[in-house]
Image (cartoon, helix red, strand yellow):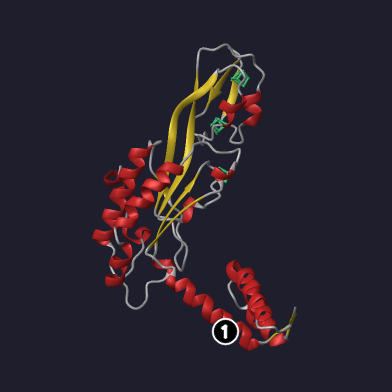
C-alpha cells in the first residue's frame, strides 16, 4: 500500500508501542474503503477511532500475566488460579468508580491500578513497573540424597548461587543470590536439590510515566492465600489514601510494607 509523505510523517508521531497496530488498522480501513493510497485524513480518522476505543476499554484496573501458561518451559510456579482470584476480587472493588470521583476529567490508562504476574523471575510481564508485581517462585533445598557431583545445578544457575564445597563435594546454595527460579531443581538427577517453598514473590509500587519508579520487593515467598491478602490490603490502602488519581507508588512508603503482609 502506498502512503503519501504527510500520512507517513503522521504515523511516525504515533507512540512506538502502538504504531504498528495503528498502521495495520489504517491500511485495513483504507483497503475496506476500496482505496490503494493512504492520505493524511485516513490516518487522522483511524487515530481518532483508535483513541475512542482505547478510552472505552478503561475499566480502572488491569490484571495481566506472562505467556507461561502457553507452555513456557521456564515456569517456576503456575499462577493461573491465583490470577483468576485476584481479577475476581479487583472487579468487585469498582476502582473505576473510585477513580471517577478522584480524577479531574477522564480516567485514563495511566490512572489504572495495574497487577501483573510473571511465572518465573525472567519477568516477561514486567512486574517491576506495576502497582503489584507477582513472580512465580520455587526455592530450592538441599536434601540428604547422595549427590553425584555432576555439577548440572552449578552450570544451570544463572545467578552463580550454587558452588561445590571443596571439603565435602556437596553443593552449597547462596540464598542471597538465589531468585527461586526452580532451574537447579529441574536438572538435579538425584533429588539432592528439591523444592522447599513453592509460591510467589511480591513486588509493590512500580510505575512508568513522568516519574517512573521500580517496585520494591516484600521479604519472602508467599502462598496463593497470602498473595491474595496482600492484594486486598494494597487496594484497601490505595482507596483510603490516593487522592486526585495518585498512583499506588506515589502514596506508599517502604515503612508501610509491614501493613501489607
Ligand atoms: S516470565 Fe518466565 S514463565 Fe513467563 S513467559 Fe517469561 S520466561 Fe516464561
Ligand atoms: S533456584 Fe534458580 S537461582 Fe536459585 S539456586 Fe537454583 S538455579 Fe540458582
Ligand atoms: S546436587 Fe544434583 S545436580 Fe547438583 S551436583 Fe549434585 S547431583 Fe548434580
In percent of the image, x 56 and y 48: which residue is there?
Answer: 67
The answer to whether one can see residue 122 in this image is no
For residue 197, which quarter of the picture?
A: top left
In percent of the image, x 56 and y 79: which residue is there?
Answer: 47
Q: Residue furthest right?
A: 2
For label 1, the crowd category at 10 Å Cα-Cα, with few meaning under 14, some 14 to 19 and many 20 or more, is few
Q: Secondary structure at mark 1?
A: helix
Is residue 35 shown above or below 97? below
Residue 228 % position (x, y)? 34, 44
For residue 34, which quarter of the picture?
A: bottom right
- Tell me if 234 is positioned left or right of 82 in this view: left
Is residue 218 shown above or below 29? above
- Tell me if 5 is positioned left or right of 117 in this view: right
Residue 226 % position (x, y)? 33, 39
Is residue 204 shown above or below 201? below
Q: Quadrant of ligand 2?
A: top right
In percent of the image, x 34 and y 78: which residue is there?
Answer: 105
Is residue 187 shown above or below 223? above
- Tell me if 13 is positioned left or right of 98 in this view: right
In percent of the image, x 51 and y 53: which residue is there?
Answer: 126
Of 171 and 52, nearer the camera is 52
Of 128 and 12, nearer the camera is 12
Location of the N terminus by quadrant is bottom right
Count of number-bearing discs: 1
For residue 238, which quarter of the picture?
A: bottom left
Residue hosting label 1:
45
Location of the C terminus by quadrant is top left
Q: Is mark 1 within 8 Å of ligand 1?
A: no
The answer to whether one can see residue 71 in this image is yes
Amino acid at each position: 500500500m502506498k502512503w503519501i509523505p504527510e500520512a507517513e510523517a503522521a504515523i511516525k508521531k504515533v507512540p512506538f508501542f502502538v504504531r504498528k497496530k495503528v498502521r495495520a488498522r489504517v491500511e485495513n480501513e483504507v483497503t475496506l474503503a476500496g482505496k490503494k493510497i493512504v492520505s493524511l485524513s485516513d490516518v487522522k480518522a483511524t487515530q481518532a477511532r483508535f483513541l475512542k476505543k482505547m478510552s472505552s476499554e478503561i475499566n480502572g484496573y488491569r490484571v495481566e500475566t506472562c505467556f507461561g501458561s502457553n507452555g513456557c518451559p521456564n515456569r517456576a510456579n503456575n499462577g493461573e488460579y491465583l490470577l483468576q482470584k485476584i481479577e475476581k476480587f479487583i472487579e468487585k472493588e469498582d476502582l473505576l468508580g473510585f477513580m471517577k470521583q478522584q480524577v479531574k476529567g477522564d480516567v485514563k490508562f495511566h490512572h489504572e491500578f495495574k497487577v501483573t504476574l510473571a511465572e518465573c523471575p525472567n519477568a516477561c510481564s514486567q512486574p517491576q513497573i506495576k502497582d503489584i508485581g507477582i513472580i512465580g517462585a520455587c526455592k530450592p533445598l538441599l536434601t540428604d540424597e547422595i549427590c553425584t557431583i555432576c555439577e548440572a545445578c552449578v552450570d544451570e544457575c544463572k545467578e552463580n548461587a550454587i558452588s561445590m564445597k571443596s571439603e565435602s563435594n556437596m553443593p552449597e546454595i547462596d540464598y542471597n543470590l538465589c531468585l527461586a527460579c526452580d532451574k537447579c531443581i529441574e536438572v538435579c538427577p538425584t533429588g539432592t536439590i528439591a523444592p522447599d517453598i513453592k509460591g510467589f514473590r511480591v513486588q509493590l509500587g512500580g510505575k512508568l510515566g513522568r516519574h517512573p519508579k521500580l517496585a520494591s520487593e516484600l521479604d519472602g515467598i508467599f502462598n496463593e492465600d497470602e498473595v491474595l491478602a496482600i492484594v486486598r490490603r494494597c487496594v484497601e490502602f490505595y482507596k483510603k489514601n490516593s487522592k486526585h488519581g495518585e498512583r499506588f507508588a506515589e502514596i506508599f512508603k517502604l515503612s508501610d510494607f509491614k501493613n501489607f503482609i
